[in-house]
Image (spheres, rainbow, N blue to C red):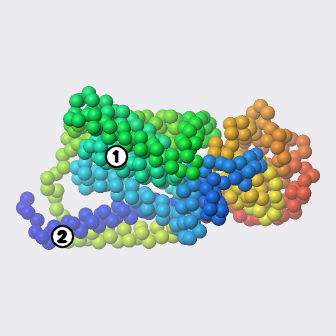
């Protein structure tokens, strides 16, 4: 087949560009859809509190179990960013941030795939599979977005350090300083850095590489400085010890902290990249760098301890296994040296169709920027009508709530109504307090400790938990309101009970479906 004319080359470049724009618009259309994460209400409230008081370490104003406690807000900088964006731009600011972070991740990965010598088409296919597998973790605005991006940066730095020596590692101290003030996931970053460093040092000394002592000293120094950088935060060294303790604690009431099950949805998404990675590693002719292989094996095993680590495993697969997937792919299905050309008229029509569809998808994406949806199955329904009733009644007091609803309640009703527990978990509540909440919810043992030990006035419970039936039978407590999702009880004889009974029930959806954050 002869060489293309300049006009044909322009047509082909234009077609590829149009196809890329269509793929990009598809990604944007998919990722701009956003539902409210349970912690989002808390981030806005706590961020506003920090901005108003100019204090990062804050006393607890929202729980009657821990009044005035100085708590460890290890995501304080995320809260400030979220609150600032929401106050300035509304939901568009938060959705825009999520989309920007995601697109940066996609851009970095695509560039990495191309450096690993994947063709443009194959790099795009691998990237689309990655986005598909990551989609459930990209539908909410969460502090974890910071960890996804910075974990990716860490992996890319380690990849370059494996190929080019120690100097790329000196980018990490600044990264870990920022990361430690954004999200506790920096512990995962430190973990892979330590795994890489130990494996790299072992490789240097076993292989007898030139200047092993100098190389080893540089690696150790970069690791030490990176660890010290994480201590530059409002809580100092306490942040590391606190997060280490909480990361190892059991969390039976949170699904994403349970081990990965391959037969479930999350397991299938994990396998979308894990299977190609394993096959690529087996069939690849490229060097298997021991330090990177150690990191990959450790991170791929992490989801079997807690499913919330799946995105980190997917990122590790995308960075470390990409060149092996590409090499194995080229062995199984070599790329055609000169793909068949479409007639110029067909190519122009195809380009126009791609650009038209891309423009349509962008237009359809615009309305999605205005709403962070409530009541999604993936994020959990909220007791919107019950909380609206409490807000309209104007009552104050202490209320038992489910863990899943605590942050929503304190954001909508606090600090007038104080809660028994919320999504801050270990940052505010000790093990005994969390156990009290679980016993109440599931009706276990001394299930009513929250009612007898503390000055509790109200209880908002889920209808599908044992607590609902137990509260109906408990003397001295009165059912004030219920719907298919939740039930509100009050201690008989209190003025709050009379005020709530006088308040008409709002017509808002009981579970918030169809409404937007906040």
At horizontal 62% and vertical 62% (from top left) the residue drawn is 54
Disc 1 crowd rating (10 Å Cα; few below 14, some 14-19, many 20+) is many
The correct choice, above or below, for 103 with respect to 177 in the image is below
Secondary structure beneath disc 1?
helix
Residue 273 in view of the camera: no
The correct choice, above or below, for 215 with respect to 91 in the image is above
Toward the top, the furthest residue is 206
Q: In the rendering, at what x and y percent does residue 94 appear?
A: 53, 63
Q: In the rendering, at what x and y percent does residue 390 appear?
A: 78, 59
At horizontal 26% and vertical 27% (from top left) the residue drawn is 206
Task: Give the left or right position of residue 225, taking residue 490 as reference.
Answer: left
At horizontal 79% and vertical 65% (from top left) the residue drawn is 392
Secondary structure beneath disc 2?
helix
N-terminal-most mark, 2 or 1: 2
The N terminus, quarter of image: bottom left
**Which of these two is toward me, 429 or 259?**
429
Q: In the rendering, at what x and y percent does residue 137 appear?
A: 49, 50
Q: In the rendering, at what x and y percent does residue 416 appear?
A: 78, 59
The residue carrying mark 1 is 169
**Which of these two is toward me, 283 or 410?**
410
The residue carrying mark 2 is 10
**Which of these two is toward me, 512 or 392?**
392
At horizontal 63% and vertical 45% (from top left) the residue drawn is 427
Residue 360 in view of the camera: yes
Rendering quarter of residue 53: bottom right
């Amino acid at each position: 087949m002869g060489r293309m004319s300049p006009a044909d080359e322009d047509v082909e470049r234009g077609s590829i560009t149009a196809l890329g724009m269509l793929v990009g618009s598809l990604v944007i259309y998919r990722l701009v859809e956003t539902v409210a994460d349970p912690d989002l209400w808390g981030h806005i409230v706590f961020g506003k509190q920090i901005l108003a008081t100019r204090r990062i370490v804050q006393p607890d104003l929202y729980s009657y179990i821990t009044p005035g406690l100085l708590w460890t807000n290890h995501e304080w900088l995320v809260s400030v960013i979220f609150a600032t964006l929401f106050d300035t731009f509304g939901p568009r600011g938060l959705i825009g941030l999520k989309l920007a972070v995601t697109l940066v991740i996609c851009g970095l990965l695509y560039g990495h795939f191309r450096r690993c010598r994947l063709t443009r088409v194959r790099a795009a296919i691998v990237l689309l599979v990655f986005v598909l597998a990551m989609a459930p973790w990209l539908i909410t605005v969460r502090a974890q977005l910071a960890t996804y991006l910075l974990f990716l940066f860490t992996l890319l730095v380690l990849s370059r350090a494996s190929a080019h020596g120690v100097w790329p590692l000196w980018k990490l101290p600044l990264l870990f300083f920022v990361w430690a003030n954004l999200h506790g996931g920096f512990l995962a970053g430190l973990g892979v850095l330590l795994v890489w460093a130990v494996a790299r040092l072992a490789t240097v000394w076993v292989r007898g590489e030139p200047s092993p002592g100098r190389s080893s000293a540089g690696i150790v120094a970069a690791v030490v400085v990176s660890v010290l950088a994480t201590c530059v935060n409002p809580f100092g060294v306490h942040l590391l010890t606190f997060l280490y303790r909480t990361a190892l604690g059991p969390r039976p009431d949170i699904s994403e902290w349970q081990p990965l099950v391959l037969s479930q949805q999350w397991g299938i998404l994990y396998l979308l990249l894990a299977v190609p990675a394993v096959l690529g590693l087996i069939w690849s002719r490229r060097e298997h760098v021991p330090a990177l292989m150690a990191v990959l094996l450790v991170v791929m095993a992490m989801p079997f301890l807690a499913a919330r680590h799946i995105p980190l495993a997917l990122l590790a697969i995308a960075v470390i296994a990409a060149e092996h997937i590409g090499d194995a792919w080229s062995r199984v299905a070599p790329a055609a040296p000169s793909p068949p050309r479409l007639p110029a008229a067909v190519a122009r029509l195809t380009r126009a169709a791609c650009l038209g569809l891309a423009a349509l998808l962008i237009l359809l994406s615009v309305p999605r920027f205005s709403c962070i949806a409530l009541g999604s199955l993936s994020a959990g329904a909220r007791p919107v009508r019950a909380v609206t009733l409490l807000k309209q009644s104007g009552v104050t007091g202490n209320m038992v709530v489910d863990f899943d609803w605590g942050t929503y309640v304190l954001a909508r009703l606090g600090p007038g109504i104080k809660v028994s527990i919320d999504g801050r978990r270990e940052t505010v509540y000790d093990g005994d307090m969390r156990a009290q909440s679980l016993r109440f919810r599931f009706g276990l043992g001394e299930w009513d400790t929250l009612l007898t030990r503390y000055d509790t006035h109200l209880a908002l419970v889920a209808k599908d938990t044992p607590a609902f039936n137990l509260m109906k039978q408990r003397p001295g407590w009165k059912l004030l309101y219920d719907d298919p999702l939740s039930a509100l009880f009050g201690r008989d004889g209190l003025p709050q009970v009379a005020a709530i009974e006088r308040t008409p029930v709002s017509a808002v959806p009981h579970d918030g479906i169809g409404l937007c954050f906040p």
